[in-house]
Image: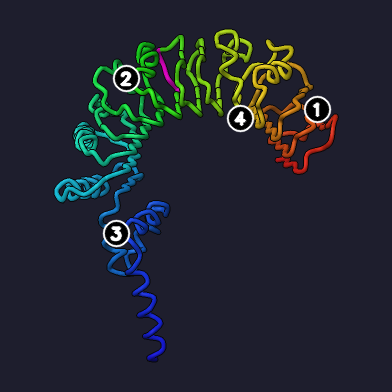
Amino acid sequence: MKFGKRIRLIRTTQLEDIPVELIHRIQSFLPEKEAARTCVLSKSWLHAWSTIPTLRFTQKQESGNMNLIDRTLVRYFRDNMSIESFHLDIEIKNQESAFIVETWIQQLVSKRSLKELHLTIKSDECLFTLSHEIFLSENLKTLRLRGDRWFVSNLKLVKCVFLRELELMDFEITEDVIDNLTNVFPLLEKINLSCLSGLTTVKVKNFRYLRELRIAPREEIHLEIDNVPNLRLFHYNSLFNCLNKIVSYSNVDSLGNVKELVLSGMSMDDDPFFDSMISSIFPSLEILTLENPSWSKNTLNMSNVVLKKLTLRLGEYKPIKVQINAPNLILFCYKGYTIPNLEFLTVSPNESALN
């Protein structure tokens, strides 16, 4: 019995000795319920959970949930506790709730400790205004905004000049805002512009530190890419454009360092030399993913001497023959409704997955 108590004492002492910063980090990686359960481990873990600088609220709008979020933020603001990362995924159904959420955001962006802000707000039945104060958080590094056709018209007052990651989804936005991103966010490393409306041209230029670019427009656009020397991942999702159009509007030299390319919904009928075009435009390409490409032929030819991973995701029920000439291919993945007729013109890859 005494031996058992000694074991429990040692374990409790060890748990108490863990630095609160490490406890916060562990809790931030756990699902919300699992992180909350760590409170029973010791007083240190209970204190860490009540002061964790990463806040996540992902439930749908309910009166109890709204009250919980409000009480939590009131406590953090009252006690001047640090909030480094804030995630909110909520559906608001009345104007009173919309006003409350707007107030939360205005208070959050005033905290100098804020580094990450993730907002997914659905407001089908009421008017929700995204305040321009959201761009006044001086130390913000990551900003992800998803809404129901929010409108962004200007970026005149911006203090988050150290922003590294920007994601805008389901936005009504003007072209001058996109064109001005280089001036207001010069250090961007990741850009994700998805389901944007109101654009005919998207210019991604002079981002010296940009590593990842994801574009998914609602309508056909002219995509211009230039002076992005460190771009490594390019993901383009469009039912309107073909690769040839993208290339014709862009500086091809800017795509030479791309190592991972994802093309979704791309038309291939207008690109008779699709595979050779990829090889010439993306000479460093190692990973290629084609998602639901459209083409009239039943044969897909792919030839690339540097490609290491190829993924095909097809949504059609037609039989297809795939001919691959990629001597350095290590991994081939296929997902579709019919099993393809595969032909590897060189050595077969070390691993293949068919779903």
Pointer 1: residues within 10 angstroms few (<14), some, or many (20+)? some
Q: Earlier in the sequence, mark 3 or mark 4?
A: 3
Give the residue number, with chain letter if any, for mark 1: 325
Amino acid type of disc 4? Glu
Query: In percent of the image, x 78 and y 39: which residue is there?
Result: 349
**Residue, x 26% and y 32% (percent of image)?**
138
Residue 194 visible in the current orientation: no
Q: Is residue 179 above or below residue 97?
A: above
Separation of residues labelled 2 and 1 (CA atoms): 47 Å
Q: Measure the C-alpha gap from mark 1 to mark 4.
A: 18 Å
Residue 16, compared with residue 126, is above or below; it is below
Q: Position of residue 248 (x, y in %)?
A: 59, 8
For mark 3, what is the residue? 48
Upstream in sequence: badge 1 or badge 4: 4
Q: Which residue is mark 4?
A: 260
Q: Secondary structure at mark 2?
A: strand
The scheme the figure's colours follow is rainbow
Residue behind mark 2: 151
Residue 139: horizontal and vertical position, in percent?
29, 35
Q: Are there few (<14), some (14-19), or many (20+) residues within 10 Å of tag 4?
A: many
- In percent of width and height, residue 107 lies at 19, 37
Q: Residue flagged by tag 3: what amino acid is it? A: Ala
Q: Are marks 2 and 1 in contact (CB under 8 Å)?
A: no
Q: Which residues are magenta?
A: 194-198
